[in-house]
Amino acid sequence: MNALFEYLLRLGDDSLILGHRLSEWCGHGPILEEDIAMTNLSLDLIGQATSFLKYAGEVEGKSRNEDDLAFLRFEREYKNLLLVERPNQNFGATMMRQFLFDAYRKLFFERLVHSTDSQLSAIAAKSLKETKYHLKHSSEWVIRLGDGTEESHQKMQSALDDLWKYSAELFYQDDVDEDLIENGIIPAVDAIKGEWDVLVRNVLEQATLIIPSNNWEQVGGRKGIHSEHLGYILAELQYMQRAYPGMKW
């Protein structure tokens, strides 16, 4: 399989699935401003997914467009991180999931803008502007809730304890990555890990939250091995295209 196509699926699927997760908050936000904010975050991520998956279709060369790749693949063909398919739970847990992802994506896009692939570089440049806001938003909420009331602190610590084991997959690297790194198309994730650690620890310290001490790592999404949660997401996401193939608004 073409390494660039596989990698574009990873990037596109991360944005698509997390964007869908955030869209589930529409009409259910804790306050009106956050209801609107999370809907806008979702739209940003769906826009990024569109760009990555459209390019993936072009690279594949089999006449599949971004809609085909989003709506007409099976569960094992999705390459998103397990982190982004985790359930929303409460607002604090959603912000914790978002923060861990945003911290990585911001650092990643800062490097991807220097890609030797001009189209990837252009997508990264646009996405970086959005992701800087996403990180500001999620990190401020993590601090506010973590260092808030006894109840909000407990919920944020519980969310961190649950999600931390999924953060290791952010830095997953295999032969797909190595081929693209060698050609200057993508950055090496090990160069990002140190900065991510510093950024995340700084925010969590301000939030008075303790990073879990266990070393258990939950991975598999990059290879198409997912939790049961993705199946439910796809059942909802793909329903119209599965029921009415080729349907357009």
Image (cartoon, helix red, strand yellow):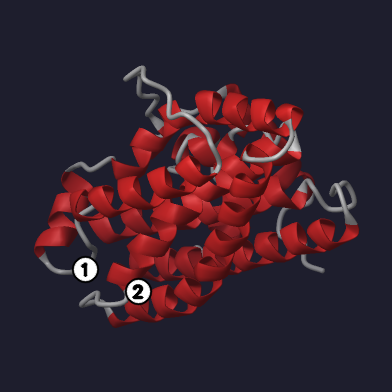
Q: Residues within 10 Å of mark 2 (few under 14, many from 20)?
A: many
Q: Under tag 2, what secondary structure?
A: helix
Instruction: Compare residues 6 and 39 and report the one nearer the observer.
Output: 39
Query: Of residues 27 and 34, which is closer to you in this image?
Result: 34
Q: Residues within 10 Å of mark 1 (few under 14, many from 20)?
A: many
Q: For the point 38% across and 52% down, which residue is it?
A: 199
Q: Looking at numbered disc 1 in the image, what kind of residue is underneath it? A: Ile
In percent of the image, x 60 and y 46: which residue is there?
142
Q: Do tag 2 and tag 1 residues touch (Cβ < 8 Å)?
A: yes
Q: Compared with residue 238, is residue 233 higher up or lower down, i.e. above or below? A: above
Q: Earlier in the sequence, mark 2 or mark 1?
A: 2
Q: Which residue is mark 1?
A: 185
Separation (CA) of disc 2 from disc 1: 8 Å
Secondary element at image label 1: loop
Residue 141 x/y as whole percent: 65, 51
Classify residue 22 as left or right of residue 86: right
Name the residue: 12% across, 67% down: 183
From the top left corner, tell me how far across and down residue 131 is, in percent: 51, 66
Residue most toward the left?
A: 182
Q: Is residue 202 left or right of residue 19?
A: left
Q: Is residue 78 shown to the viewer in this render?
A: no
- Residue of label 2: 120
Horizontally, is 221 left or right of 134 in the view?
Answer: left
Q: Residue at x 51, y 46 (%)?
A: 206
- Dividing the image into 4 quarters, which one contains the C terminus? bottom right
Is residue 6 placed above or below 89 in the rendered structure?
below
Task: Determine whether 226 is above or below 124 in the image.
Answer: above
State the image coordinates of residue 102 (x, y, percent, origin top left): 49, 55
